[in-house]
Image (spheres, rainbow, N blue to C red):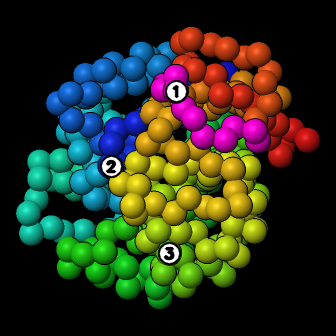
C-alpha cells in the first residue's frame, strides 16, 4: 500500500508518504494549536508499524516549519533531511531554533542532486527503499551558492528548496519543489534532469511567483497539478493542465496501491472539473470523498 497525503493547513505545506515498504516520510510541517494534536496523532498512527521514519524539510520558512518542535517532541525525529545551509533570522521563533538544532545535529542528512542513502533510494534484504530521489540542488552551482549566501544573511529562503520525486515501480511519479520561485527556476532549469511525472505539487503554494516555466512543464508533462492554499488572488491556475485546488478540496489523498491511482479530498462539495479522472468505484470513507482515478504513466 502506498498513500500520499497533502494536509489542508492554510497558507503552508505539510505532507506524508505512507510507502509500500517499511518507510514513512513527512515533508515539511505547518501546524497550529487547533490542528497539531489531530495531525500528529494521524502521523503517529500511520508510522507506528514502520521501521524508518524520515522528515524532509524543504526550507526554513515559518510556513514550512511551524509546529516542528511539537512534532519532534511527540514523535522523535531521528532522520532529518535538508539542504545543508547556515540560514539565520533576525527574529528567531522557537520552531526556527529547533530547525537549526536538527539541521546541525547528529541525525541530519544533507540532500543534493543524485544523493543516495540506504533506505531512501537503496533497498536491501532488511527493507525496501522509499523511492525518493533528489534532482536538485547541485551544490557547486553558482546560482545555488548565491541562494545559500542569501539565507546566511537572513533572506531568500525559498530558493534553497530541493527538487525531488517519489516514485513507485511501474506506478506513480510525484514531484515537489518546495517554494522555489519562477525566476530561480528559469536560471537553473537546464541543470536539472527533468522526468515525466503524474503529480506535481506546484511550488510556492501555487503562487504566480512560483509558476513553473512552460518549457519545464512540457518536459515533466504532469497529469495533475496540485495548487496550494495561497490566497486566490496570488494563485496561478495553470491553464491547459488538469488541476486540483487545495483551497476548495481540503486534504488531498492519492491512493497508489494498485494499477490505478485513486484520488480523495476531505471536502464533499469540491466543484472543480474532474473529467480527467475516471470513475473506478473506489469509494473509501476512511480516505475521504472519492474524486476519481487515473492510470499513472509507469503503469501504461
- The region drawn magenta spans 266-276
Task: Name the residue that disc number 1 marks.
Answer: 269
The quadrant in which the N terminus is found is: top right
Q: Is residue 85 left or right of residue 232?
A: left
Q: In this view, does 83 lie above or below 183?
A: above
Residue at the far bottom: name it.
142
Q: In this view, does 264 lie above or below 205?
A: above
Which percent across, then down, holds residue 123?
67, 38
When asked about the image quadrant of residue 113, the answer is: bottom right
Using the numbered discs, state the Cα–Cα distance from disc 3 to disc 1 in whole angstroms.
32 Å
Q: Nearer the N terminus, badge 2 or badge 1?
A: 2
* Mark 3, secondary structure of its residue: helix
Q: Nearer the N terminus, badge 3 or badge 1?
A: 3
Front residue (pair 74, 119) = 74
Task: Name the residue that disc number 3 marks.
Answer: 182
Front residue (pair 90, 283) = 283
Q: Residue at x 34, y 38 (%)?
A: 9
Q: Nearer the N terminus, badge 2 or badge 3?
A: 2
Q: Is residue 237 left or right of residue 240?
A: left
- Magenta stretch, main secondary structure, is loop
Q: Residue at x 46, y 22 (%)?
A: 47
State the mark number for residue 11.
Answer: 2
Which percent across, then down, holds residue 152?
24, 76
Using the numbered discs, state the Cα–Cα distance from disc 2 to disc 3 in whole angstroms.
19 Å
Q: In this view, does 229 lie above or below 129?
A: below
Q: Can residue 148 be seen in this view?
A: yes
Amino acid at each position: 500500500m502506498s498513500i500520499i497525503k497533502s494536509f489542508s493547513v492554510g497558507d503552508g505545506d505539510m505532507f506524508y508518504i505512507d510507502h509500500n515498504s517499511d518507510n514513512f516520510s513527512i515533508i515539511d510541517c505547518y501546524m497550529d494549536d487547533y490542528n497539531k494534536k489531530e495531525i500528529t496523532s494521524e502521523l503517529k498512527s500511520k508510522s507506528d508499524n514502520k521501521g524508518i521514519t524520515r522528515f524532509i524539510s524543504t526550507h526554513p520558512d515559518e510556513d514550512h516549519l511551524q509546529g516542528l518542535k511539537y512534532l519532534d517532541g511527540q514523535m522523535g525525529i531521528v532522520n532529518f533531511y535538508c539542504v545543508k545551509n547556515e540560514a539565520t533570522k533576525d527574529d528567531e521563533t522557537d520552531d526556527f531554533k529547533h530547525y537549526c538544532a536538527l539541521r546541525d545535529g547528529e541525525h541530519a542528512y544533507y540532500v543534493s542532486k543524485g544523493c543516495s542513502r540506504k533506505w531512501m533510494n537503496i533497498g536491501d534484504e532488511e527493507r525496501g527503499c522509499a523511492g525518493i530521489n533528489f534532482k536538485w540542488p547541485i551544490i557547486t552551482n553558482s546560482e545555488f551558492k548565491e541562494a545559500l549566501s542569501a539565507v546566511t544573511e537572513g533572506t531568500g529562503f525559498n530558493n534553497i528548496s530541493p527538487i525531488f520525486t517519489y516514485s513507485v515501480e511501474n506506478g506513480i511519479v510525484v514531484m515537489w519543489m518546495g517554494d522555489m520561485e519562477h525566476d530561480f527556476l528559469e536560471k537553473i532549469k537546464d541543470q536539472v534532469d527533468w522526468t515525466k511525472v503524474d503529480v506535481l505539487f506546484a511550488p510556492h503554494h501555487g503562487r504566480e511567483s512560483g509558476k513553473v516555466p512552460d518549457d519545464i512543464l512540457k518536459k515533466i508533462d504532469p497529469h495533475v497539478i496540485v495548487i496550494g492554499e495561497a490566497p486566490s488572488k496570488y494563485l496561478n491556475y495553470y491553464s491547459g493542465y488538469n488541476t486540483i485546488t487545495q483551497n476548495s478540496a481540503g486534504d488531498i489523498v492519492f491512493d497508489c496501491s494498485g494499477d490505478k491511482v485513486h484520488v480523495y479530498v476531505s471536502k464533499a462539495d469540491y466543484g472543480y472539473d474532474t473529467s480527467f479522472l475516471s470513475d473506478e468505484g473506489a469509494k473509501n470513507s476512511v480516505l475521504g470523498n472519492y474524486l476519481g482515478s487515473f492510470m499513472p504513466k509507469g503503469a501504461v
